[in-house]
Image: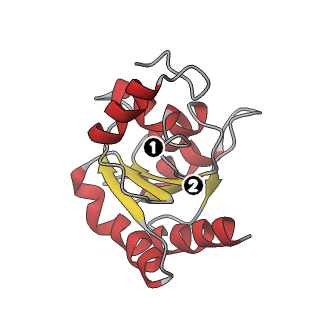
Amino acid sequence: MSDITPETQTEAQIEQIEEDFEASGALVGIIMGSKNDMEKMLPAEKYLAEQGIESEVHVMSAHRDPAKVTEFCTTARARGLKVIIAGAGMSAALPGVAAAHTDLPVIGVPILGKSLGGLDALLSAVQMPPGIPVACVAIDGAKNAGVLAARIINA
């Protein structure tokens, strides 16, 4: 499905994608590269819930399952999402890959890894080429990603 864009999606394809990602009226998609990142990403979900903003949380790796990331991001707008928060550690490709496959705002959350103090993840998220923007919060700054997503939605 990687060649599907919001403009070329059929109604049946959108319905299948909604089933795959359990579309629920969420406005923010929170994705992370590993289930090990869940604890560090939950503050974003918690903040959004406190603000009455529904979110959906998924684990998907830009390296291990790039097709799933592509499908999620290319269909995000059609499923009603307004912002994607992408958290990843080490090489942190997920925020950039997400931004490359959607025109929605993408907020990167660099996650502290076992080496380099999270600097590798931070630089991977902020050093994007022109035309592929990723907003970036602090290392392990998922709560601020939730705050920023809420501000974007409420702007």
- Position of residue 50 measured from the top left corner of the image (x, y, whole percent): 44, 84
- Position of residue 33 measured from the top left corner of the image (x, y, whole percent): 33, 45
Mark 2–mark 1 Cα distance, whole angstroms, equals 18 Å
Residue at screen point 36% across, 49% down: 23
Label 1 sits on residue: 92
State the SS at label 1.
Answer: loop
Front in this rendered view, residue 59 or 23: 23
Front in this rendered view, residue 115 or 71: 71
Tell me where residue 69 sits by quadrant.
top left
Instruction: Specify whether residue 87 is in view.
Output: yes
Residue 83, disc:
2
Left or right: 1 as drawn, with respect to 78: left
* Residue ranking furthest to the bottom: 50
Instruction: Specify whether residue 113 is in view.
Output: no
Left or right: 55 as drawn, with respect to 20: right
Tell me where residue 26 sits by quadrant.
bottom left
Amino acid type assigned to the residue bearing label 2 in the image: Val
Q: Is residue 5 above or below residue 137?
A: above
